[in-house]
Amino acid sequence: VDLIHAFFTVPAGVTGAILKGSHGLPLVLSLRGSDVPHHNQNEFSRTVRLASSLIGSVWHRADSVVSLSRALRRTARLTYPGLVSDVVYNGVDTDRFTPASAQRLEGAPRLLSVCRLVKCKGINHLLLACAAVKSGGQDFQLEIVGDGPERGALVAQSRELGLSDK
């Protein structure tokens, strides 16, 4: 092992900081969202806020901290103002994963969203966009996989927008 790369501060980053101390290995920490105090309101937010001093300590011990987005990095700096963090976005290998051409597409396009159902994911905006597509006469199928505190509101919004059949 040449390097520890931990995703999420708690618990992986804490474990990484301990291993860094005991084995002298460099630690790269990837902030993903739920591990950053004040980032979103979800089932972990209170615990994360209470652990903010531990979180700041882990960030300080890491050799490199990377954030998923500039917004997440800004929010992380509310907890640890001196945080130096590069932004590394999620990526996709576009040589392996390419959209089907319109000629090869059979039937209505199928859309899939897999995530925790929290406000910051913007699924409410996805539903509004789908309602606009539907009103324009385009057929599609949307499947949303996940759970979270916004589930009830999103189900209600889907009904209100007439998307239940989609």
Image: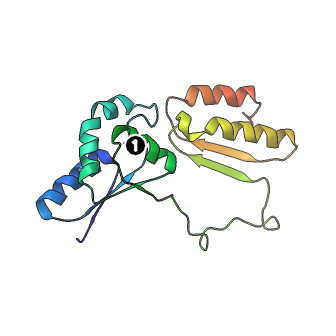
Residue at numbered disc 1: 76
User: Residue 112 in the image: x percent, y percent?
Assistant: 63, 49
* Residue 51: quarter of image: top left
Task: Quarter of the image for the N terminus: give it.
Answer: bottom left
Q: Is residue 63 above or below residue 140?
A: below
Left or right of 126? Residue 89 is: left
Seen at 21% across and 53% down, the residue is: 17
Amino acid type indicated by mark 1: Ala
Element class at badge 1: helix
Neighbor class of circle 1 (other Cα within 10 Å; few <14, some 14-19, many 20+) is many
Q: Is residue 97 above or below residue 58?
A: below
Tally of marks: 1
Seen at 68% across and 41% down, the residue is: 126
User: Residue 88 in the image: x percent, y percent?
Assistant: 47, 59
Seen at 85% across and 38% down, the residue is: 135
Task: Quarter of the image for the C terminus: give it.
Answer: top right
Residue nearest the viewer, comparing 83 with 37? 83
